[in-house]
Every structure is written in structure tokens, then in C-alpha cells.
Image (cartoon, helix red, strand yellow):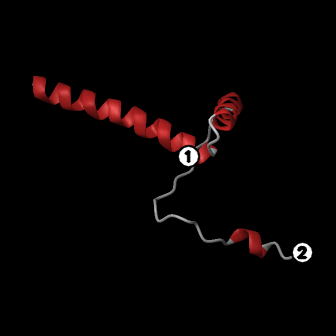
Amino acid sequence: MNYDQFLYFDVPTKKPRTTIYIEPELMQALEKRAKKEKRTISNLCNLLIEQAMSEWLEQEKTSENET
């Protein structure tokens, strides 16, 4: 079997990519939630990061306006 075919593939998006390392328990929880919400784990992580960063940016904006 030619394993090279699995190493190179076109990613359907031009968005930047990153790699994270997480605890097995967190991965299991992400898998469970993603399955329940009919999402991919990648999509779920993107959503959670967007939500957390949106909250953080709002807090930053508020704290900058206070100074």
C-alpha cells in the first residue's frame, strides 16, 4: 500500500491551522459534545475559541476604556 497518498491532501480552507495538545479527558468531552451537536471536533474547537476570544476582547475593550 502506498502510504504517501495519506500524507498530502488538499485542505478545503485557506484558514490558518494550529496544533494543540490536550488531556485525554478533555478530548473525550470534546468528542462527546461534538457528536451530540453534530459537529466535527475542529469545528467545535473553533466555535469555543471564537466565543472565548469574543468575551476576552470585550473585557479588554472595557478595561482600556476605564484607564
> Type of residue at label 1?
Asn
Q: Earlier in the sequence, mark 1 or mark 2?
A: 2
**At 65% across and 40% down in the image, what residue appears?**
38
Q: How far from the left and from the top, in percent, is residue 15? A: 46, 60
Residue 31 numbered mark, or none:
none
**At 62% across and 43% down in the image, what residue appears?**
41
**Image mark count:** 2
Determine which quarter of the picture holds residue 65.
Answer: top left
**At 65% across and 71% down in the image, what residue appears?**
9
Q: Residue furthest right?
A: 1
CA gap between label 1 and label 2 equals: 31 Å
Crowding at dot 2, Cα within 10 Å, few <14 / some 14-19 / many 20+, comes out as few
User: Which is more toward the observer, 23 or 36?
Assistant: 36
Q: Is mark 2 on a helix, strand or loop?
A: loop
**At 75% across and 69% down in the image, what residue appears?**
6
Determine which quarter of the picture holds residue 36.
Answer: top right
Q: How far from the left and from the top, in percent, is residue 45? A: 54, 41
Question: Mark 1 and 2 residues: CB-CB less than 8 Å, in contact?
Answer: no
Q: How far from the left and from the top, in percent, is residue 35? A: 69, 37
User: Which is more toward the observer, 6 or 21?
Assistant: 6
Location of the C terminus by quadrant is top left
State the residue position of label 1.
43
Q: How far from the left and from the top, in percent, is residue 19? A: 57, 50
Asked if residue 49 lies left or right of residue 55, the reply is right
Location of the N terminus by quadrant is bottom right
State the residue position of label 2.
1
Q: Is mark 1 on a helix, strand or loop?
A: helix
> Type of residue at label 2?
Met
Q: In this view, does 63 lie above or below 35?
A: above
Comparing labels 1 and 2, the label whose residue is closer to the camera:
1
